[in-house]
Amino acid sequence: METGTGTTVSSTSTAARRYEVVVFGSANLDIVATAERLPGPGETVLGSAYAEHAGGKGLNQAVAAARSGAAVAFVGALGGDTAADTLRGVLAAEGIAAHITAVPAPTGRALIVVDPDAENSIVVVPGANAELAAPTALAPAAVVLAQLEVPIGAVVDVFRAARAAGSVTVLNPAPAGELPGELLPLADVVIPNEHEVELLGGAAALLERGARAVVVTRGAAGADVVTPTGTTHVAPYPVAPVDSTGAGDAFCGSLCARLASGDDLLTAARWAAVAGALATTQRGAVPAQPQAADIRTALAGG
């Protein structure tokens, strides 16, 4: 996989790939309230709408990759409750292979408030996600994608196995926090948003610590592809947003689908920028993930 800016990130040809993208990560039931504004500390505001959607960064990104045309497997943990049944149903409906660990803990939840400007405030309760361990055998894939809503040690183990199998590794470091020294050298591509990259010390620092490329998502301002040879800006796709929940996940999952299909990193990022923008035009995380045909039409100027 060529980055498009002078750095090569590639998967080696090993055994036949069973999947194009394997996503190792969280699955939640999102509980979403719409309000006129986000509440401040100690404040109660009245909501105008309520909905429950499938979510969690891992599940969102798996759906995004599948809708961008990739053959996807999701590796995660769920509880033994009705929320787990809902999430299993979503995976089946999207054609995503489910490699699920059932644990004696509640399925993860995300409590989300969205305002009229599509800004949101989110509290994530990990639940079963906190019990997820690296599988003893990782399904072969062109690209392996992970986030940080699951134990970080398990992410390190998964990336180590993925690298050994010749897969491209992609890390979405969200929520941002202290990263173990061995993680970034195992990450071919790191995708933080504009806030996370600052908390992590900047794109240059991520490269210095071992990442081979960094893609910084900047919301309505597009994205930046950063490699040791320079920075290339990816222009935004203009939309009228209604809910930004899941937009970053749309970017991550769709980018991995395009990398798995053979796109270079810059071309994949252009596709992903459109996917992320389109995801803001619908409410909810999984429901808002765009289809490949819609992304393709937008890229063509339709």
Image (tube, rainbow, N blue to C red):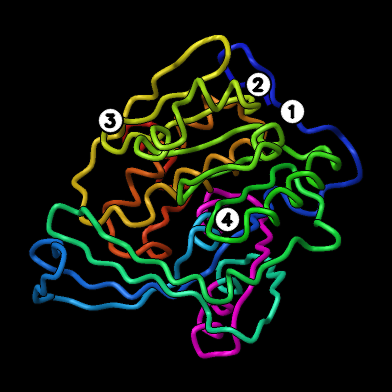
Q: CA distance from mark 3 to mark 4?
A: 25 Å
> Are the residues flagged by discs 1 and 2 in contact, CB closer than 8 Å?
yes
In this image, 141 relative to 57: left or right?
right
The residue indicated by pointer 4 is 66
For this orientation, the residue located farthest to the right is 15
Q: CA distance from mark 2 to mark 4?
A: 22 Å
The residue indicated by pointer 1 is 10
Q: CA distance from mark 1 to mark 2?
A: 7 Å
Q: Is residue 261 above or below residue 65?
A: above
Bin the neighbour count of mark 2 within 10 Å (Cα to Cα): few under 14, some 14-19, many 20 and up.
some
Bin the neighbour count of mark 1 within 10 Å (Cα to Cα): few under 14, some 14-19, many 20 and up.
many
Quarter location, residue 85: bottom right
**Three-letter amino acid code at the position of disc 3:** Ala
Q: Residue 150: x, y in percent?
A: 59, 61
Q: Residue 203: x, y in percent?
A: 48, 25
State the extent of the magenta-drawn residues as a range: 62-90
Chain-order first, disc 2 or disc 4: 2
Bin the neighbour count of mark 4 within 10 Å (Cα to Cα): few under 14, some 14-19, many 20 and up.
many
- Tell me what residue is drawn at x 70 percent, y 57 percent: 154
Q: Residue 61: x, y in percent?
A: 52, 54
Considering the image in quadrants, where does the N terminus appear? Answer: top right
The label nearer to you, 1 versus 4, is 1
Q: CA distance from mark 1 to mark 4?
A: 21 Å
Q: Is residue 72 magenta?
A: yes
The residue indicated by pointer 2 is 2
The label nearer to you, 2 versus 4, is 2
In this image, 247 relative to 292: left or right?
left
